[in-house]
Structure formats: C-alpha cells, structure tokens
Amino acid sequence: MKFIHLSDIRIGSSSESGTPWENARQTELEGALSRVMDEAVSFDADLVIITGGLFSHVPTTIELDELNGLLSGFPMIDIVIIAGETDQIKKSSPIQSYSWAGNIHYVMSGQPERFVLKNISTEITAASVAAYEQASPQAISEVACRPHPDSQPIKLAVLRWAEDEDVKNSFYGTNISYVAVGSSTPGNRTIAANAHCPGFFEPEAMGDNGSHGMLEGVISESTGLLEKIEFKPMASASYVPLLIKTNAKTTAGELEELVEREIMKRGETNIYRLKITGTRNPEESFDLSKVKAVYRISEILDETEPEYDFRELFAEHPQDMIGFYISRILNNKHEMSPVEKKAMFYGLDALLHTSVKNEE
C-alpha cells in the first residue's frame, strides 16, 4: 500500500499580506493541493493523509465545495484529513454538517475514531484538534491496538501534534504500521522508525529554511510493516537569506546585476532577505528599489562601510572636526561594534559633505 503524508498547507494564508507578490503567493498556496494530488497519481498512491492545517481559517461552504470537488476527482485514492487548530471546529462551522464524497474521510472529533478501508486492507485510528483539545498518543494507541472484528493487516494512527517522547513511548512495541504526526515545527523529522512528521508543506516565515514538502511511504500488505519512507520537496517557494559582498569598486549598477544573477540562480519565486556587506566607494550609494520591485525581496539590510583613506583625509584636515573624527577612528582602542562603526562613518560622511558645501 502506497501513501502520501503531508501537513499544514494553510490554504488562504495571508503571511505575505501587503507585499507586491501577495496575490501570486496566494495562488501558489491555493494550487498546492492540486499538485499533491497530481503527485499522488504519479506515485500510484492508495492513500493521502493530511494531518491538520489544511486551511488557515474556518473554511466557508464555498471553500469546502471546491475542496470536495477537487478530491472527489480522484475516487481511486482514499483521503484522510484531520481537523487542525486553524479549522476552529465549532457547532456553527459549515464543516459540521458537510457531506463529503465517498473517498474523503474528515475527522473532527478530539477523541480517537477507528474505521476500516477494506479496499486497501487498512485500519485508521485518528484524532483531530477539536476546540484545541486532542486525545493523547497513549489514548490513540490503546484504541488502535484493541481487537477489531474486521481487523486489517495495515494499521495507521493519525494525530495532530504531540511530544516526540510521548509518541515513541505510546507506540513502541505495538503492531501499528505507521504513525502520522501533524506539524508542531516547520521541518520534516523522524520521530521513530514508524513515526514521522512531514513539517509544514510550505514555509510560513523567514527562518523556515530548508526543504518543505511531504512524505511518500510504502507498507507491505502481507506483513503490515513500513518498507519505505522518503521526503519529497514540494514547496512552490522558499525563504532564502541572500548575502552579497561588495568592495570599493562595486557600482550601484553592478550590485543590481549581481543581485539579479543570484536570485535567478536560486529561483524567482523564492522570497529573499538580502544582506549586503563589505565596503563601498564613499561617493557611491546603493539603491535596490528597482530590483525589489521585480523580485520577491522582503528585506534589504545594507551593512556596507565606506572605504575612506583615513590618513590622506587626516593630512587634509589635521585641525578641524573632520580631523577629530578621523583621529578617533585611527586611535580607537577597542573593536567598534557595527552600530558604533556605522555611527562614526555616518558622522564622517556628514562632515565631509558639509565641508564640500561650505567650500562651494
């Protein structure tokens, strides 16, 4: 039996709200599940498991209709979804009375539910996050391991989030084929030999570095043992820290070209936090507004320092305020912090430009 396990697609997410690429990113997230199902067909999957976080908000009836319409288009694949905290299951939620297609199994109860998928020889025991409450891994394990009149060789446990040690202790020594754990952290991780968490399907904020996607697994129908589990990168974008180093010969135009080249190498759909370090010509200013208007750059940190010839300047200004500033720089006894350096250089730059204006 082949399966796919994913978590936290966050349809309707507005994490990029207010950015020029907000609408494009929203479209990418809305198309994520279509990409998952296309991959499920290519992988010849029998089952897709979504361990919470499908929506970023309480889904409306229209959104549920769209979801049901998409997933019902793959009747040969069973789909198990557990409600996450963002679904906020309440008595008034449209999802409470929604009629799903036959291949969709949506679990809303915070208590363990057990059901059988005979066509793939599989038992599912699952619990969702209902009103921010969920059964413990121990409770889910106990239900999953009870004798069942229609017992199947493949046994899956599906839960939203839990401490890794609780998962290990609760399912150690049981005959559970696979434990699908929802995301409490962005990254993919192995909890135990048969227990895995795929992490967030898409990165959600700067710092969610590394690969994001889903897990593809194979379980033997004869032994009920997990034979294979692999992580498959699927995210449409990544948050990428990009460091660019300049020197005193770097022009503003050259910097623009350099940033563009580096972004093109890494991918135009990625979201960048750009940091520029090194030195620059004191007469050169770096303005990357044109590049920022074209590419997804969330932040630009310019930490370049002007490369002055301090001794030559001191020779020209031995007894004025400029000379005083330079002597402070040259005779400084401790290593200046980046903030102190920047303040010193800004002060010197202001004095030099004031001096030029006075001469004019």
Image: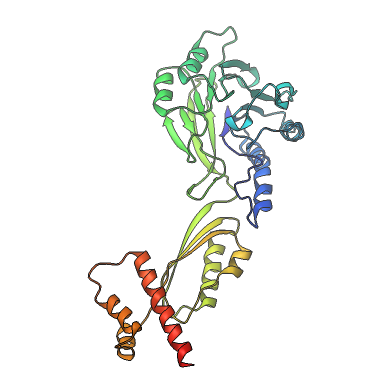
Q: Does residue 79 show up?
A: yes
Q: Which residue is located at x 67 percent, y 29 percent?
A: 77
Please name the residue shown 25% across and 72% down the image.
332
- Within the image, what quadrant is residue 318 found in? bottom left
Instruction: Indicate the position of residue 192 as horizontal and vertical percent values.
Output: 41, 29
Residue shown at the point (27%, 78%) measured from the top left: 330
Q: Is residue 183 above or below residue 30?
A: above
Callout count? 0
User: Is 55 on the left or on the right of 284, as rendered?
Assistant: right
The furthest residue to the bottom: 360
Looking at the image, the residue that sits furthest to the left is 333
Is any atom of residue 51 visible in this view? Answer: no
Q: Name the image quarter holding the N terminus.
A: top right
Where residue 80 appears, as percent x and y from the top left, is 62, 26
Question: Residue 128 at what x, y percent from top left?
Answer: 57, 24
Left or right of 223, for residue 294: right
Q: Quadrant of residue 158?
A: top right
**Towards the viewer: 184 or 218:** 184
Of 262 and 335, nearer the camera is 335
Whether 327 is drawn above or below 357: the answer is above
Q: How is the image coloured?
A: rainbow
